[in-house]
């Protein structure tokens, strides 16, 4: 398993969670250059716990987004398994500005100017957010609220991934409410990408052990997994690259 490319896959924005899961599964087979990837569709279905149609649709979408590329090579006993490579230069494009929907010409926009009535050209009265007419704002409360919203958004991504991985291994995720409470209490959490990566790797290890006839215990409920900091079983260190270079994960 190539953990560097798995970490890369975890950071990509590709739209649907099923597409990201397929991308992570593909990344496991990449060589050091992100190439020579040729798992069968059946293998991807087994590892992702997705049906064949969803896997094929996900691959098609990843190709259209240019996250992965068809190298033109074919392998396997029937010489029909597609060989893919990962596109390290991939950048997520907003669907509103993608060529598929046409670009937005700012000069020809028919949207009315801000603070202007759509019925007449009279200016609409505007009061600053902190104006007494609207009530004063407590900045510390707003800052705390934003942090709560961001943490809830991160938990939603993490929980969705847990549901998929727990289902693959036949484990019960437990109560979402208890998991969210534990997530909110946890200190020094790594990024949501690192958490998702840890759960995915642990699920793959459990499935590999079961397929080879070895014992593999089921996942703990998600709230226990968080409370016991089980991501530390896999992640050694999370390092931020200089500037906007993203994040590197060191895995056990």
Image (cartoon, rainbow, N blue to C red):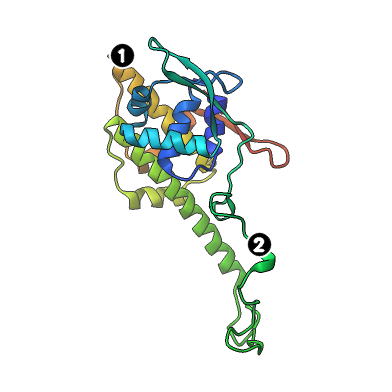
State which quadrant residue 124 falls in: bottom right
Query: How dense is the environment of label 2, judged by Cα within 10 Å: few (below 14), some, or many (20 and up)?
Result: few
Report which residue position mark 1 lands on. Answer: 212
Q: Is residue 175 above or below residue 59?
A: below
Q: Is residue 111 left or right of residue 10?
A: right
State which quadrant residue 16 falls in: top left
Q: Residue furthest top?
A: 77
Q: Are marks 1 and 2 in contact (CB under 8 Å)?
A: no
Query: How dense is the environment of label 1, judged by Cα within 10 Å: few (below 14), some, or many (20 and up)?
Result: few
Q: Position of residue 224 (x, y in %)?
A: 36, 40
Q: Is residue 113 above or below residue 188?
A: below
Q: Residue at x 61, y 89 (%)?
A: 120
Q: Mark number for residue 111?
A: none
Q: Residue at x 46, y 54 (%)?
A: 152
Quick one: 208 or 23, which is closer to the camera? 23
Q: Earlier in the sequence, mark 1 or mark 2?
A: 2
Q: What's the CA distance linking mark 1 and mark 2?
A: 58 Å
Q: Position of residue 62 (x, y in %)?
A: 49, 36
Residue 227 visible in the displayed image? no
Q: Residue at x 64, y 84 (%)?
A: 126
Q: Position of residue 78 (x, y in %)?
A: 38, 12
Q: Position of residue 41 (x, y in %)?
A: 37, 25
Report which residue position mark 2 lands on. Answer: 105
Residue 204 visible in the displayed image? yes
Q: Secondary structure at mark 2?
A: loop
State which quadrant residue 207 falls in: top left
Quick one: 30 or 73, which is closer to the camera? 73
Q: Nearer the viewer, mark 1 or mark 2?
A: 2
Q: Is residue 94 left or right of residue 55?
A: right
Quick one: 123 or 177, which is closer to the camera? 123
């Amino acid at each position: 398993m190539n953990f560097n490319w798995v970490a890369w896959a975890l950071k990509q924005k590709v739209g649907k969670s099923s597409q990201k899961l397929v991308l992570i599964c593909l990344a496991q087979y990449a060589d050091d250059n992100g190439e020579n990837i040729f798992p069968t569709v059946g293998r991807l279905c087994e590892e992702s716990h997705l049906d064949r149609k969803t896997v094929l649709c996900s691959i098609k979408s990843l190709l259209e987004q240019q996250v992965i590329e068809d190298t033109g090579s074919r392998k396997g006993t029937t010489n029909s398994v597609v060989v893919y490579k990962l596109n390290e230069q991939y950048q997520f494009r907003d669907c509103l500005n993608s060529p598929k929907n046409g670009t937005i010409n700012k000069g020809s926009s028919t949207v009315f100017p801000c603070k202007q009535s759509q019925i007449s050209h009279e200016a609409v009265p505007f009061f600053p957010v902190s104006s007494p007419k609207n009530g004063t704002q407590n900045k510390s409360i707003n800052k705390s609220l934003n942090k709560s919203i961001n943490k809830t958004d991160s938990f939603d991504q993490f929980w969705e991934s847990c549901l998929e991985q727990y289902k693959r291994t036949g484990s019960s995720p437990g109560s979402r409410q208890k998991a969210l409470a534990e997530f909110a209490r946890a200190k020094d959490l790594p990024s949501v990408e690192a958490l998702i990566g840890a759960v995915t790797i642990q699920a793959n290890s459990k499935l590999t052990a079961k397929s080879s006839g070895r014992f593999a215990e089921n996942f703990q409920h998600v709230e226990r997994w968080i409370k016991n900091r089980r991501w530390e079983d896999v992640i050694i260190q999370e390092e931020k690259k200089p500037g906007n270079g993203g994040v590197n994960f060191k895995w056990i």
